[in-house]
Amino acid sequence: MLTKEQVAQSFGITEQQVIDLRRAMSRTWSNCCYDYIDCFPGGVEGALRAHGTETAMIAECTLDADRVTTFCPDMELDFVYKLEDGSWRSDCIKMAEACWDAR
């Protein structure tokens, strides 16, 4: 498990952005987790089987379809989907997983 500093360095973001993304994911997950889990046969167990880990499930649910910005419009989250040069971030799910698990 990586520290917030290590995650920030790995993905070219700040430690505050690691904290912000985790906070946004938490808020988003708390708003849509039940509806998301209901989409899977077998409920929680089915959702976990589909994703492999709880962290992967939360990252996918909260970042897919831009949900973090929908549920957290007051937060600056452009860095989640775009790099500094304006190109799309190809590793946003991996970054979200790392931010979620960072200590």
Image: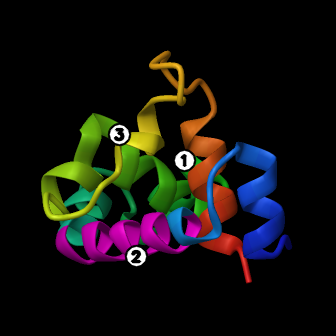
Seen as rendered, the residue at the extreme bottom is 103
- Who comes first in sequence, dot 1 or dot 3? 1
State yes or no: discs 2 and 1 in contact (Cβ < 8 Å).
no
Question: What amino acid type should be assigned to the residue bearing mark 3?
Answer: Asp
Residue shown at 14%/51% (left/top)?
70
Q: Position of residue 74 (x, y in %)?
A: 15, 64
Residue shown at 27%/57% (left/top)?
36
Q: Which residue is mark 2?
A: 23
User: Label 2 to label 1, Cα distance in Å?
Assistant: 24 Å
Q: Which residue is mark 3?
A: 64
Question: What amino acid type should be assigned to the residue bearing mark 1?
Answer: Ala
Left of 46 or right of it: where is 52? Answer: right
For label 2, the crowd category at 10 Å Cα-Cα, with few meaning under 14, some 14 to 19 and many 20 or more, is some
Q: Position of residue 101 (x, y in %)?
A: 68, 73
Q: Nearer the viewer, mark 3 or mark 2?
A: 2
The reply to whether the magenta stretch includes residue 22 is yes
Quadrant assignment, res 83: top right
Relative to 84, residue 8 above or below: below
- Who comes first in sequence, dot 2 or dot 1? 2
Q: Which residue is mark 1?
A: 50
Q: Nearer the viewer, mark 1 or mark 3?
A: 3
Seen as rendered, the residue at the extreme top is 87
Helix, strand or loop at label 2? It is helix
Give 14 or 26, whichever is nearer the viewer: 14
Stretch in magenta: 18-31
User: Label 3 to label 2, Cα distance in Å?
Assistant: 16 Å
User: Label 1 to label 3, Cα distance in Å?
Assistant: 15 Å
Left of 22 or right of it: where is 33? Answer: left
